[in-house]
Image (tube, rainbow, N blue to C red):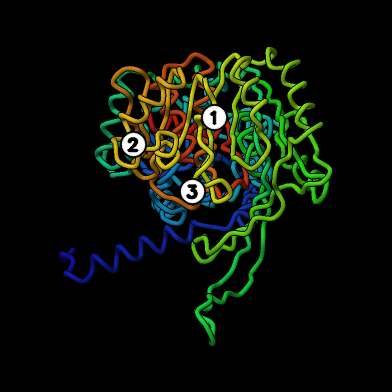
Amino acid sequence: MAPLGPSALPAEAEDRRADARRKIYPLGELARVARALRARGLRLVLCHGTFDLLHIGHIRHLQRARREGDVLLVTVTADAHVNKGPGRPVFTEGLRAENLAALECVDYVAVNHAPTAVNVIEALRPHVYAKGSDYRDAARDVTGAIVQERAAVEAAGGRILFTDELTSSSTRLLNEHFGVFEPRVRAYLDRLRARHEPEAVDRALEGLRGLRVLVVGDCIVDEYHYTTPLGQTGKGYALAVRYEGEERFAGGAVAVANHLAELAGSVTLVTGLGGRDSHEAFLRASLGERVEPVFFVHPERATLVKRRYVGEDLGKLFEVYLGGGPLTEGAVGRAVAAWLERHLAGYDAVVVPDFGNGFVNPQMVALLCERAPFLAVNAQLNSGNRGFHAVTRYRRADFVALNEPELRLACADPASPVETLAESLRRRLGARQVAVTRGARGLWMADGGEGLAVPALATQVVDRIGAGDAFLAVASLALAGGLPAELAAFLGAAAAALDVQIVCNREPVRRAALRKFVGTLLK
């Protein structure tokens, strides 16, 4: 045969790509194909996964699965449901599907727009569902999906197969060779990995589920009014926008309680509402299953609403405060204090997200400092309290989490190094640790020794609102549970990295997502 000319190879390659694409179907169409194949008496095998970086372990797994039947179907998790943390998947769902379709052993491919393969199994009804050997122990699957998937395949009359081919880790290869993290972050993770085995960290996280936590703080209803900016008005200098829609979120102490409920055994939330425009039904519906609310109502006030007008890419245009004000005056304050006196001793940890909006009064501060078994505090600086609300209103705390402006306000020092100020504040409050979050620069934790620096673990940011609350919740719980400061800072930073991918407080940082992301970082 004559050698191929210079133009033949690209054409041949394009033909192969076209052949691969012809194997890719929408899931609904693939279900119809599967029914036809079963009707012909053919034996169907299904594999499902992310397949972010296709490697020899994947290929041997697929080849082994193919030997179990006549047709190999493969589904890949859609980008929106790849639960491996910021920066993942590296390759889009379309590219991942095309990679799989290019393999000779693969007959059909579909993208699955769901978090597990249960819907795929129910639609395709495979005779065999093949998973890698690392899923044989269901307890190691942090999502719990393998149990549901096994039940689904057996309900459809099939069986599950765990292959024992050569294994490798897409996550490890991507972390090491594809620049998912910048060198400074990789170096930090390498040092952390050398001291903490992923399995041990996961067990430590699971160990927090026995803790009883009390959250005391301001309740906030956050509103996002989505707009499209139109530019300057025709007469004057005001910005004109077109209204597109709106969304409400349960924020403040409610958001902190929801984060904690994902990891702790039980959470009690003590907060205040206004008797007018209370939003109580919405707030109750927004609470996690393991959060028990204790609401104190001031009859003459309204629950604080922070209405933000949001432009393109979630850029905040301006903010309006509605309601709010002191909620613990007179009889209401006395009732809260009496409740705290009766119940504080019954908790393992007390977390106080003090937003300075009128719920936490001086009497409550004194009680918390005196009687909380483990006290974690954040005194937030915001537009409603700027300049006069500092963490130094607490004479004692075990853990303090602040951002840099809050630290500088507390120390009345605009210029000294953060490390120096954090250690000074730690000694002043008798705290074990003081953490200072610094956005893209990561965080610093003063612990009485050399201190701990943790780089920012997020590779992409959707919305920064609420990231500090996620850090406070997870780091506080870890420290209350006896985890080392280094590990608590890391886990809090990981929670914050997940939270900046969530719009405002649309949902908490889920336990399964945090466990999976931590495992990804430590591979």
Amino acid on which the number 2 mark rests in the picture: Pro
Q: State whether residue 116 appears in this view.
A: no
- Tell me the distance, in whole angstroms, between the alpha carbons under discs 3 and 1: 26 Å
Query: Horizontally, is 170 left or right of 148 in the view?
Result: left
Query: Horizontally, is 10 left or right of 298 in the view?
Result: left
- Tell me the distance, in whole angstroms, between the alpha carbons under discs 2 and 1: 29 Å
Which circle's residue, 2 or 1, is located before the other in the chain?
1
> Do callouts 3 and 1 mark residues in contact (Cβ within 8 Å)?
no
Which of 181 and 278 lies nearest the eye of the viewer?
A: 278
The quadrant where residue 52 appears: top left
**Quadrant, the N terminus:** bottom left
Q: Which residue is mark 2?
A: 455
Q: Which label number is shown at residue 464?
A: 3
Which circle's residue, 3 or 1, is located before the other in the chain?
1
x, y (%) of residue 279? 78, 48
Q: Which residue is mark 1?
A: 393
Q: Is residue 233 above or below residue 150?
A: below
Tell me which residue sits at (54%, 26%) in the image: 394
Amino acid on which the number 1 mark rests in the picture: Arg
Secondary structure, mark 3, is: loop
The quadrant where residue 281 appears: top right
Amino acid on which the number 3 mark rests in the picture: Arg
x, y (%) of residue 81? 54, 46
Label 2 crowd bin: few (<14), some (14–19), many (20+), radius 10 Å: many
Which circle's residue, 3 or 2, is located before the other in the chain?
2
Which of 149 and 83 lies nearest the eye of the viewer?
A: 83
Tell me which residue sits at (29%, 65%) in the image: 12
**Quadrant, the C terminus:** top left
Secondary structure, mark 2, is: loop
